[in-house]
Image: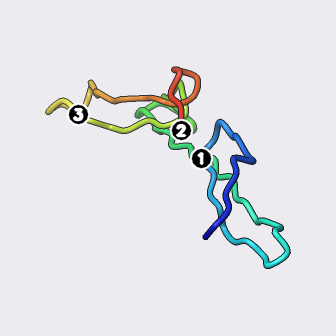
Amino acid sequence: MVNSAWFFDCPAFSGFTMCSRDGRVLLSKESWRSGLQFRGPTDKKERDLSWLDYATLRDISSDGTLISFDDWGSAAGAQA
């Protein structure tokens, strides 16, 4: 029989990596972020268009002047 107990609560994605025979545990915490970069014809450098934590490009207009994207993350109330 395996004994178990709730011992850790983390708002970010975390993982249980391993447990030693004496009960010590190794945990990992990962933080993911994705940005959406843009540089126009007269811009000197790229700009980050994302607002939150994870931007995903969904569509671009045929003339390239408009884009559609999703952006989500903990700032929007997303929970792991």
Q: Amino acid at mark 1?
A: Phe
Q: Residues within 10 Å of mark 3 (few under 14, many from 20)?
A: few
Q: CA distance from mark 3 to mark 2?
A: 30 Å
Determine the residue positioned at 22% across, 34% down.
Answer: 59
Determine the residue positioned at 50% across, 29% down.
Answer: 50
The dot on residue 61 is none
Q: Which residue is mark 3?
A: 60
Can residue 60 be seen here? The reply is yes
Q: CA distance from mark 3 to mark 1?
A: 31 Å
Q: Which residue is mark 2?
A: 80
**Element under label 3?**
strand
Does 73 sit above or below residue 24? above
Q: Which residue is mark 1?
A: 13
Q: Residues within 10 Å of mark 1 (few under 14, many from 20)?
A: few
**Element under label 2?**
loop
Determine the residue positioned at 42% across, 32% down.
Answer: 40
Q: Mark 3 or 1 closer to N-term?
A: 1
Name of the residue lying farthest toward the top: 76
Q: Residues within 10 Å of mark 2 (few under 14, many from 20)?
A: few
Is residue 29 rendered to the left or right of residue 13? right
Q: Are marks 2 and 1 in contact (CB under 8 Å)?
A: yes
